[in-house]
Image: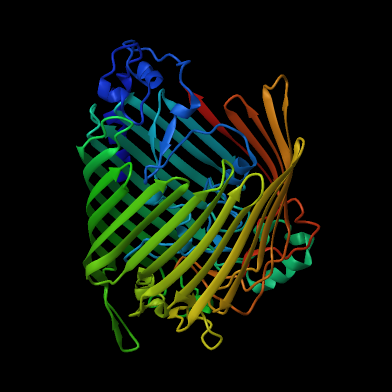
Amino acid sequence: MYNRFLILFFLLSFSSAFSQIKLNSGNVSKETRESAITDTSLNKNLNRNSRNIVKNKDAKIEMYRIISKDFDTTYVDTTLTINKEYKFNYLRKDNFNLLPFSNIGQTYNTLSYDFTSKSLIPVFGARARHFNFIEVEDVNYYYVPTPFTELMFKSAFEQGQLLDSFFTVNTTPQFNFSIAYKGLRSLGNYQHILTSTGNFRFTANYKTKNGKYNVRAHSVIQDLMNEENGGIIDEDLVEYESGNPRFFDRSVFDPAFEDAESVLKGKRFHIDHYYNLIQQKDSLSQNTLSLGNIISIENKYYQYKQSSPYTDYFGDAFSSSNLNDKTTLENVYVEANTRYKNNIIGELKFNVGYNQYNYGYNTLVSTNGNNITNRLKGNVISVGGGYKNTIGKFFIQGDFGFNLSGDFDGNFLNGQAKYNLNYDAQIIARISLNSKAPNYNYLLYQSDYINYNWQNTFDNIQTKQLGFEITSKKLINLNLDYTTINNYTYFNKTDAEPQRLKPNQHNGTVNYFKARIGKEIKFGKLALNNTLLYQKVIDGEDVLNVPDFVTRNTLYYSNHFFDKALFLQTGITFNYFSKYNMNAYDPVLAEFYVQNNKQLGGFPRLDFFINAKVKQTRIYFKLEHFNSSFTGYNYYTSPNNIYRDFSLRFGLVWNFFM
């Protein structure tokens, strides 16, 4: 009811504003003309007196701007490239380092890690369900000369589909809003793995005509539901690996159970606004001073429900029926900040933050003589700052933060230096230091399963990461990262207690190195796009498991047809990662855990695709994993979970410019 009311409120609030868009020419104030994100053509379109919407022929694609949380600006891209092929998926981003489960909307096993973090306090658990969870830094804001719409469709497995719809408009040069919804329903090829997810997002940004006051806000409502089956039983895996034709219909496999489901829900309201005490006067005088404020309120919960306990895998339960685990988090963050910018000194920022959290459960638990509390409640006061500047060909940027008081200690320091060798190549060096408490579900967890109840006091995880990057379209893209982690936390089971999953903290140092190389080679209308990752855990290989090699190679052909009315790309993509002790998935926690008994991987994945662009529409066809029937039935996405068989997938992305 709350979700429907909020959506209806947004639609009613801004339908009247949209109906008043003015489309005849008129005067624009001097302050508006001097604004950094407006221009003459855009203002002409937004200040007309006619009530009829007329397509603006003066609008350029570069005027449809996308603005990130950190004010980095790009624009709408309607081209068809190989990178668009890599991003045409459920997450809508390149998932090179992720291995999806069999059904779209399920979780992903992680093939490589990035431990860069600015977090000062623990984050919510159930991380295996957060791949499609929209965080604050994932939300963009917009500025467009005419109403803009994007529709995305992709087929799912068996019954269902994936739809992502987006609309944004500037009702005036000062005010923009956007509304979007991504919905998925997919039955899947195996028993009891239905997925049904929805992500609603609304954004608004406004500034006064003189540009002194600026505000950006968003609201996100998310509901991610998965049926859980615990994977395929070991007896049926023997039939799968033998290639028994009776089991080509994957629905005949017996899963561990068919009576469980998990759901992750979240609601967030976020506002970021500031006032310029000293305003930039012209392009030559870049001298500004602003005072700002951020308020972010978020409620989320993870719930696991099961009709009867599955004691063979999870152990005994307190109840013999209707198991219901629900973990909640209420978090409020308030920040006051000031920012000073000068064309010589650069940009300086300082902030003071207040974080109030309430994590836990509604009951107390006593097991094996131990009393487990129900709540972690408290507050943290933090300070932070940042600096960035461009000096000749050098760009330097850094930020820091640390907790002054509260129940958790934490700090971070990030810095990077970039040097432009020429118009094509640049070198980047990075450093990241972070110390924070483990995620909440390591510290406190309650469940109807007896083994899934604990309360721990762990030391802070201390991470140091050094990075070096060279980017060049003509030469090569190279990324090097070296990470050391002290007090690394992880989940695992032991041979002595195979039914007991528990959190652990490594008492040594984990050293993790990775090198990623990317290069595209072109032969006329043919191209070979290559990405190769080599990584090694030098110390701590029994707690952090990754494959040594991950590669993706795409050979494709591109050309225009029918007097350039159609642009076509077609090719084959080869994916491979070496065998390793692949992490196992636990549905009760919605977490992956370390296992060192079974090596999986080492199977090729071949995809054949045909993609086309007609005007502003991009059409995608793919024969996914077409080699599955002749390269061996050994493809797993985690122990007891089989990767996707051969399937035909299709979809499109359709852009509308009014």
In this orientation, does residue 126 appear? no
In this orientation, does residue 297 appear? yes
Q: Which residue lies furthest to the right in this view?
A: 630
The quadrant of the picture occupied by the N terminus is top left
**Residue at point 77%, 54% (across, down):** 627
| Residue 486 higher or lower than 249, as above or below | below
Residue 323 percent across, percent down from the top left: 40, 69
Residue 78 percent across, percent down from the top left: 55, 31
| Residue 151 higher or lower than 377, as above or below | above
**Residue at point 38%, 68% (across, down):** 434
Residue 637 percent across, percent down from the top left: 62, 63
| Along the line of sight, the residue nearer the viewer: 480 or 61 | 480
| Along the line of sight, the residue nearer the viewer: 631 or 72 | 72
The quadrant of the picture occupied by the C terminus is top left
| Residue 505 higher or lower than 159, as above or below | below
Residue 296 percent across, percent down from the top left: 27, 51
| Residue 175 higher or lower than 627, as above or below | above
Q: Splitting the image into 4 quarters, where does residue 273 fall?
A: top left
Q: Splitting the image into 4 quarters, where does residue 374 fall?
A: bottom left
**Residue at point 59%, 65% (across, down):** 514
**Residue at point 32%, 23% (across, down):** 18
| Number of numbered callouts drawn | 0
Q: Splitting the image into 4 quarters, where does residue 8 fall?
A: top left
The answer to whether residue 246 is left or right of residue 271 is right
| Along the line of sight, the residue nearer the viewer: 445 or 539 | 539
Question: What's the colour scheme?
Answer: rainbow
The answer to whether residue 99 is left or right of residue 525 is left
